[in-house]
Structures are given as C-alpha cells and as structure tokens.
Image (spheres, rainbow, N blue to C red):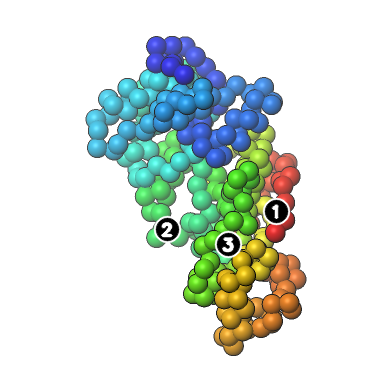
Amino acid sequence: MFLTEKAKSFKTDLLIIGRGFIGTYVQNLCTKQNVECVSTTRDGREGTIEYELPDESVPFEEFVKAANKLPYAKTLLLTFPIKGKKLMRNFIESYRVSHSSGPQNSQLIYLGTTGVFTKIPSDRHTERDPTVNPERQESENVLIEEYEGTVLYLSGLWGGNRDPRNWVRFYKTEEAIEKRIKNRTLHLIHGEDVANGIVNGLLQNFTKGERWIISHPECYDMLEILVKHLDKDNLELLKRVIAQPNMRKYVNSPKIEELKFGKDACLQRRVDPDEFWKTFGLEPSFRFEP
C-alpha cells in the first residue's frame, strides 16, 4: 500500500505500527467489528503500509519523511519496543509534524512486557525493576509523562502457532529444568484476548497516562507442561531433578506420579491483571489447557 502522496488526507480509527503477532489479531478483530484499521510492515506486504522506524542517529527530517507515508489515525498502536527517550520523541514528534492538520493529536498505546515487574506479586501500580530493559522503560516514561499515552504490559502471548506446549524444547538439561521448576508460575494471554482488550477496551474508553497489565487472571504451571510434554529422555532428567532433596521446597513429592500442579500446588500469581478487566468490563475468553 503506497500512501505517501495521499497520507495526509487519509484517516483511520487505528494505525498499527508493526503488524506482527498481536497486530494481526487486532486488525482481524477490527475488520469483524467494522473499525477502520491499517497496519505497517517493513516491506509493505499483504496490503500493509511500508514503514520502518529510522535509526536514532539520522536527522529528524528523516523521521518526518518516513512519517509522511502514514495516514492520520485517531489512535496509534506501537507493537514493538522503541529504545530510549530520543527515539520515542522523534517518532511521536515526526508523526505530529506530518499530521499537524489532523483534528487532534493521536492517542498512543504502547505494548510492553510484564518482565519489568519483578516483585511478587505485582499489579499495575507496582514499581518496575529499573534494571530490566532500561531503554525500553525510558521510552515508556516519555510516552506516558510527555504525551499522555498508555502502556499495556503483556505476559506469555499464545495463540495460533505460538503454543506453550512447544516451549519444552528449551529444557534439555537438568540445570535448565531445575531453574524452571524453581520459578514454575506461568502467566499467559491469548492474542485474541489482547485484541479484545485493545479494541473493546482502550479504543472505547482511552485512559491517558496509564499503565495496565493484561494477562489471564489464572496462573498456569510450567511444571505441568513439562511433565505432560517433555520427550522420554528429558522426562528422565526431570525425574532426577525432582528427586533431589533440595527440591522439596519447590515440589511436593520426589515421585512424578504424585506431583501437584497449579491451584493444587498453591502457586502464587506473579502479576495481577484484575484491575484491567474490571475497569473495562471485559474478561478473557481463552483458557490454556496444558
């Protein structure tokens, strides 16, 4: 899609910067609900707008030139991490320069990760860990404090080909398995539930300058996934790990057939997304089945 010449006269409800995994779910839901939506990719494939965020080192004019390809949108959804204050400012300011004739400044939604919340449990008001993705956190702060945008922190995305059962491939050593069992709580959210939260939540009732956590209210158990889906050889590794005396703190039994999972194991949630669902009057539709 080539919009360079007519971008300033073309308007849409939602512009997704970086279609990707979540952007695809969001655009599909917008289509179903007749919400005007366009998205970008680096190569302009499949009817998207070709757009790539310039490097921080280039002159501001290059950002404006790139932004001229984009239409005016009531809301922008940024789906990929932008590192640092300057890059975020350059992106937003260049878009505003390119669309200064628009009826108002666009609302900004920025996707983040719950990995910045390391206190247990954490909700949206909990202080973030400044050592985790500090440049990304800088860009979040700029978006919220200077441009009244909203950050939506996601946890454990799944859906389609992204299946948590396939994550067992990362656990092929006793060390990796032991480390995961010691931190076995798993938070997940389906792509369609994220899309619903954005389209029927934030787009309907935008909240300026807020941080939200979006996840399924229930936490899952990575140990259950490992037990059910590891291959025979790696399952033997797991058996050796749970048989170690020091693992009694983390599992209820040294025998695999006696292990308790999830709620039965009294796992504690690491993040609390309840305020998001309550505020917007929504609830997730997809529950993962290990």
- Along the line of sight, the residue nearer the viewer: 119 or 172: 172
Separation of residues labelled 2 and 1 (CA atoms) = 27 Å
- For the point 50% across and 72% down, the residue is 173
User: Where does the image place residue 69, in percent across and percent down from the top left?
Assistant: 40, 20
Q: Residue 288 carries which label?
A: 1
- For the point 65% across and 31% down, the residue is 29
Residue type at mark 3 is Val
Q: In which quarter of the image is residue 90?
A: top left
The residue wearing badge 2 is 132
Q: Residues within 10 Å of mark 2 (few under 14, many from 20)?
A: few
User: Where does the image place residue 65, in percent across and percent down from the top left?
Assistant: 32, 22
Separation of residues labelled 3 and 2 (CA atoms) = 25 Å
Residue type at mark 2 is Val
- Along the line of sight, the residue nearer the viewer: 105 or 84: 84
Q: Residue 168 carries which label?
A: 3
- For the point 29% across and 38% down, the residue is 56
**In this rendering, the label closer to the viewer, 3 or 2:** 3
Q: Quadrant of residue 83?
A: top left
Separation of residues labelled 1 and 3 (CA atoms) = 15 Å
User: Where does the image place residue 71, in percent across and percent down from the top left?
Assistant: 47, 20
Q: As drawn, is 82 to the left or to the right of 222?
A: left
**In this rendering, the label closer to the viewer, 1 or 3:** 3
Report whether residue 105 is seen. no
**In this rendering, the label closer to the viewer, 2 or 1:** 1
Residue type at mark 1 is Phe
